């Protein structure tokens, strides 16, 4: 007899429906075809043990399991449950009231028949609804994640026996329902950190406000303990709230990577990722034999913080150059390629020298001649070229730390950022793929960031006296346009340019002596 149901395979951040067919006939062997990997092949042992535990038997017949389409490689243990149900139906050990073909079924079996959670549930649920399936049967721990998708019956089950009882009609399981919009709007602003907790550092807060308003990348240079990490952690709290579409995109990536916890639902807050400097190239950008999203994709629609930037492997930093420009990661293999979104804000921090005290107001730098420049040269020019704001961070004085003056809250800063972003949305509404000032190509900068004669004189003088590089020119104009947006100004004024010029520290000649 032939039994058939459906599962799914995840490639990149999208799912492909997989047809699972099982026949039982004359013979004595178990065959699995359809390009399965080792984990899928091992399902035979898990299925047999689960059947015995539930009071059934593995048929002493020739059993053929086919996973179609046969030219797509199937990986992982999530096909255990649909294979087990099809084996029981094909061997006529059960009569099922419900049709297996109406559902997408996924789940890894333990030897006692209980179900373990799987990865990539959200893209599978989205594809199941798109293809018109009645429901999605899956482990209970993944059900809240799948229930984000409306108009699809999400059936949570704890064991294979419970799934079987649902299909033979002896046990009723109500579909799990979640109000996605209500869940999103109740948690979108639930941040623990706040800029109100930061005493002093008003100039750094201002720089981060400009970065958030224009989507600019930032590097902070300062001695240890100056507050660089603390400030970076609070940047997501002043970014505009995510839209529901952005939240779904972000949740899909974390689902594919297996980063969602038990009973996790929609990620409504902008992600903040801070990988250690020992991270490998593939872990940062994504990859592997079966490509998985890296840290820059997990930071999609949020912030990627690289602390102690010169300590990262140069090869790891260099592979970030293409994603910073194109806002996505392309990973190619011999037979296929996948793309992961990577639209993130890069926030980097570094000490000014190995000892950390170059340009410190109180402590003396002990680094030898040329050491500071050699340390800065660990970060390549092309990478610095993609960072708009260079901010020097100085330590907070004792008086500032103990002043207990009320600091501005993240909510107040965010309101200004949202207004500036609204201006940019209107400005770029006819430009596909451009949503913020930081995304403007060079030809658009000349048109949108026009300056008057006084501004040109100021910029020329600054570039000559400070020894600013040519790459600083476009960056200064983009940042000054953002500063003007924060001031609700239609034109870039001379004070906007002057403020933007001070955010190019590392472009100055002889900055490192």
Image (cartoon, rainbow, N blue to C red):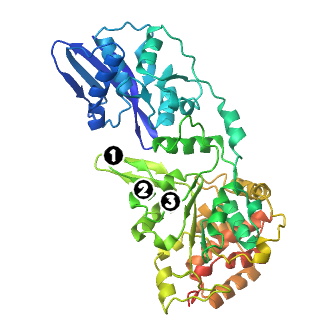
Q: Crowdedness of circle 3 by 10 Å Cα count: few (<14), some, many (20+)?
A: some
Q: Position of residue 112 (x, y in %)?
A: 37, 24
Q: Which mark is residue 275?
A: 3
Q: Quadrant of the C terminus?
A: bottom right
Q: Nearer the viewer, mark 2 or mark 1?
A: 2
Q: Position of residue 343 (x, y in %)?
A: 55, 54
Please name whichever residue, 237 or 508, is drawn nearer the observer in this view of the structure: 237
Say whether residue 190 is left or right of residue 302: right
The correct choice, above or below, for 98 with respect to 45 in the image is above
Name the residue tied to disc 2: 283
Q: Are the residues flagged by discs 1 and 3 in contact, CB closer than 8 Å?
A: no
For the point 57% across and 70% down, the residue is: 349
Q: Is residue 268 visible?
A: yes
Q: Secondary structure at mark 1?
A: loop
Please name whichever residue, 258 or 198, is drawn nearer the observer in this view of the structure: 198
Q: Quadrant of the N terminus?
A: top left
Q: Quadrant of residue 200?
A: bottom right
Q: Position of residue 296 (x, y in %)?
A: 50, 56
The correct choice, above or below, for 25 with respect to 105 in the image is above
């Amino acid at each position: 007899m032939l039994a058939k149901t459906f599962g799914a395979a995840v490639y990149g951040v999208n799912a492909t429906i997989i047809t699972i067919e099982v026949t039982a006939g004359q013979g004595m062997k178990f065959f699995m075809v359809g390009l399965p990997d080792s984990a899928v092949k091992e399902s035979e042992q898990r299925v047999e043990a689960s059947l015995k535990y539930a009071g059934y038997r593995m048929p002493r017949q020739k059993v053929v399991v086919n996973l179609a389409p046969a030219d797509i490689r199937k990986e992982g243990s999530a096909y255990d449950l649909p294979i087990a149900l099809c084996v029981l139906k094909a061997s006529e050990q059960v009569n099922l009231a419900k049709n297996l073909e109406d559902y997408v079924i996924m789940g890894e079996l333990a030897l006692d028949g209980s179900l373990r959670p799987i990865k990539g549930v959200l893209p599978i649920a989205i594809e199941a609804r798109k293809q018109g399936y009645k429901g999605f049967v899956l482990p209970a721990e993944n059900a809240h994640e799948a229930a984000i998708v409306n108009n699809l019956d999400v059936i949570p089950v704890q064991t294979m026996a419970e799934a079987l009882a649902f299909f033979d009609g002896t046990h009723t399981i109500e579909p799990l329902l979640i109000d996605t919009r209500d869940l999103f709007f109740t948690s979108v602003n639930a941040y623990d950190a706040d800029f109100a907790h930061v005493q002093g550092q008003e100039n750094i807060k201002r720089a981060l406000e400009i970065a958030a308003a224009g989507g600019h990348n930032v590097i902070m240079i300062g001695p240890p303990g100056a507050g660089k990490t603390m400030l970076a952690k609070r940047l997501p709290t002043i970014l505009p709230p995510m839209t529901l579409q952005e939240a779904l995109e972000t949740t899909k990536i974390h689902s594919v990577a297996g980063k969602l916890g038990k009973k996790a639902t929609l990620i409504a807050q902008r992600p903040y990722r801070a990988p250690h400097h020992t991270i490998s190239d593939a872990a940062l950008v994504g990859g592997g034999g079966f490509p998985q999203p890296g840290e820059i994709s997990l930071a999609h629609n949020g912030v990627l913080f690289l602390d102690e930037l010169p300590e990262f492997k140069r090869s790891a930093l260099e592979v970030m150059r293409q994603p910073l420009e194109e806002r996505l990661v392309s990973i190619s293999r011999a037979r296929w390629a996948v793309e992961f979104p990577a639209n993130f804000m890069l926030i980097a921090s570094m000490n000014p020298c190995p000892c950390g005290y170059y340009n410190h107001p109180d402590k003396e730098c002990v680094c030898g001649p040329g050491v500071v420049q050699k340390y800065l040269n660990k970060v390549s020019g092309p990478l610095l070229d993609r960072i708009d704001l260079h901010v020097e961070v100085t330590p907070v004085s004792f008086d500032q730390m103990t002043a207990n003056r009320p600091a501005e809250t993240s909510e107040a800063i965010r309101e200004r950022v949202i207004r500036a972003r609204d201006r940019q949305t209107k400005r770029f509404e006819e430009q596909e793929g451009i949503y913020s000032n930081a995304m403007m190509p060079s030809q658009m900068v000349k048109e949108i960031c026009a300056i008057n004669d006084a501004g040109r004189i100021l910029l020329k003088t600054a570039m000559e006296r400070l020894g600013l590089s040519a790459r600083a020119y476009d960056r200064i104009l983009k940042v000054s346009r953002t500063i003007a947006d924060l001031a609700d100004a239609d034109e870039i004024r001379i004070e906007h340019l002057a403020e933007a010029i001070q955010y190019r520290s590392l472009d100055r000649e002889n900055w490192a002596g």
